[in-house]
């Protein structure tokens, strides 16, 4: 069994979303044989097959779920229990294809798409609902979605000024449309943005707008959420894609806390957030009677420290390094904490589009979990983390 390969952060959601759980993967480090998984809280009426369908996973994953959770009876699961759901390999993710996304993208790029009416060719009728008419500049195309237009009809269409293309030709048609409005087109590449909080973003096309000069990402699928688009925008990159639809409907809404004060007061505010207890200011530092904890400056007299310890207090001497002091203090409360690297994948189960990672301190308080960072590369990262259900604390 891989030790400590994965930590899972279950974020606490608002009451209105109490039946939904945001599930994020946190990796401490990569290890051979590690398995990425999500956590799911079983609801009344759930079966393993229903849960697999909810995550768009095939029936073949049933054995993996049973093995991963060591279930003795896969037909006996209990509401309120939490089970692990294995994440498919990145190259084998189960994603439902939206057949209209390419047409939506063509419209965004300026092509005209007509899906109503009938085109008469000889004694044949071409129903545009099934075979859309696409205009790119001065050229006209009929999209043969079902590959049922015969050679004779294709010749007649061509003589009338219509090229027939099938779904496999759509990407090249999109590229032709791109060239009308964009220059310097790159295909199937990767952007790496940020210095501390790294975003790896895989694009279908990257180009410069012919009229504004703005660098623009163009994607065939609408799989980049608006909050992630905001991060791209903060680096001066525009995004064109079909309308985003959240396939999971499982996104949470985290809380944002910005710690006020300096030094020991900031630590006191953090402890109040985590425990609900306020410290009492003393000459040597902060005293938390109900927690039996004292936070002292490094100038405290040894005899004062001994007096506190004789009263049953745990004494934390400040070092001046905020994060080290916080880890030390939380260990005395005790509140579990660990430096981790938080990873987010888009789409969630495959990660083919992007990976965003940010380092910080995961704090598991009695009521809620929090993620502590001293700063972020871009303010636009804040709404993305909150959208993903992270309770974010900036100190």
Image (cartoon, rainbow, N blue to C red):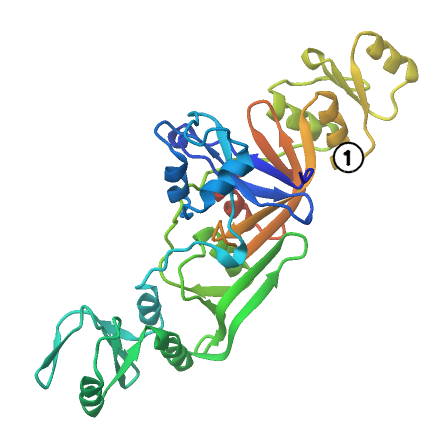
Residue 166 in view of the camera? yes
Q: Residue furthest left?
A: 123
User: Residue 291: where, in percent of width, then height?
Assistant: 69, 14
Residue 7 vs 356, above or below: the answer is above
Secondary-structure class at tag 1: helix
Residue 85 vs 76, above or below: the answer is below
User: Residue 220: where, in percent of width, then height?
Assistant: 41, 66
Q: Residue furthest bottom?
A: 159
Task: Return the residue nearer the eye: 307 or 140.
Answer: 140
**Is the C terminus in the top left, top right, bottom left or bottom right quadrant?**
top right
Task: Return the residue nearer the eye: 386 or 83.
Answer: 83
The residue wearing badge 1 is 324
Residue 382 vs 163, above or below: the answer is above
Residue 299 vs 126, above or below: the answer is above
- Residue occupying image coordinates x 62% and y 29%: 364
In-image side of 94 versus 161 (left or right)? right
User: Residue 32: where, in percent of width, then height?
Assistant: 68, 49
In-image side of 126 versus 272 (left or right)? left
Task: Return the residue nearer the eye: 82 or 160.
Answer: 82
Q: Quadrant of residue 355?
A: bottom right
Task: Return the residue nearer the eye: 72 or 327.
Answer: 72
Q: Residue furthest right?
A: 302
In-image side of 21 versus 378 (left or right)? left
């Amino acid at each position: 069994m891989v030790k400590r390969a994965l930590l899972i952060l279950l974020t606490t959601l608002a009451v209105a979303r109490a039946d939904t759980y945001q599930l994020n993967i946190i990796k401490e480090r990569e290890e051979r044989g590690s398995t990425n998984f999500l956590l799911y809280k079983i609801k009344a009426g759930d079966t393993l097959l229903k849960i697999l369908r909810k995550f768009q996973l095939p029936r073949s994953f049933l054995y993996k779920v049973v093995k991963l959770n060591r279930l003795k009876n896969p037909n006996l699961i209990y509401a309120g229990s939490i089970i692990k759901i294995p994440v498919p390999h990145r190259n084998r993710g189960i994603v439902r294809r939206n057949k209209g996304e390419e047409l939506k993208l063509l419209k965004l790029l300026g092509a005209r798409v007509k899906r109503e009416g009938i085109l008469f060719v000889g004694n044949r009728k071409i129903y545009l609902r099934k075979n859309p008419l696409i205009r790119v500049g001065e050229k006209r195309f009929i999209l043969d979605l079902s590959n049922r237009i015969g050679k004779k009809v294709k010749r007649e269409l061509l003589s009338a000024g219509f090229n027939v293309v099938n779904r496999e030709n759509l990407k090249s048609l999109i590229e032709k449309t791109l060239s009308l409005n964009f220059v310097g087109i790159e295909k199937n590449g990767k952007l790496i943005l940020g210095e501390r909080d790294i975003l790896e973003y895989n694009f279908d096309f990257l180009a410069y707008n012919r009229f504004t000069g703005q660098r623009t990402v163009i994607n065939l699928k609408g799989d980049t959420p608006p909050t992630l688009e905001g991060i791209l925008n903060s680096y001066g990159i525009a995004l064109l894609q079909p309308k985003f639809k959240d396939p999971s409907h499982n996104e949470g809404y985290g809380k944002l806390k910005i710690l006020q004060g300096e030094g020991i007061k900031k630590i006191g505010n953090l402890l109040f957030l985590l425990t609900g207890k306020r410290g009492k200011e003393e000459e040597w530092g902060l005293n938390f009677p109900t927690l039996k904890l004292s936070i002292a400056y490094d100038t405290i007299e040894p005899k004062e420290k001994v007096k506190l310890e004789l009263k049953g207090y745990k004494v934390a001497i400040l070092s001046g390094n905020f994060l080290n002091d916080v880890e030390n203090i939380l260990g005395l409360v005790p509140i579990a904490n660990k430096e981790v690297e938080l990873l987010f994948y888009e789409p969630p189960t495959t990660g083919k589009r992007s990976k965003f990672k940010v380092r910080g301190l995961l704090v598991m308080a009695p009521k809620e979990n929090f993620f502590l960072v001293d700063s972020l590369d871009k303010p636009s990262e804040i709404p993305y983390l909150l959208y993903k259900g992270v309770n974010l604390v900036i100190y």
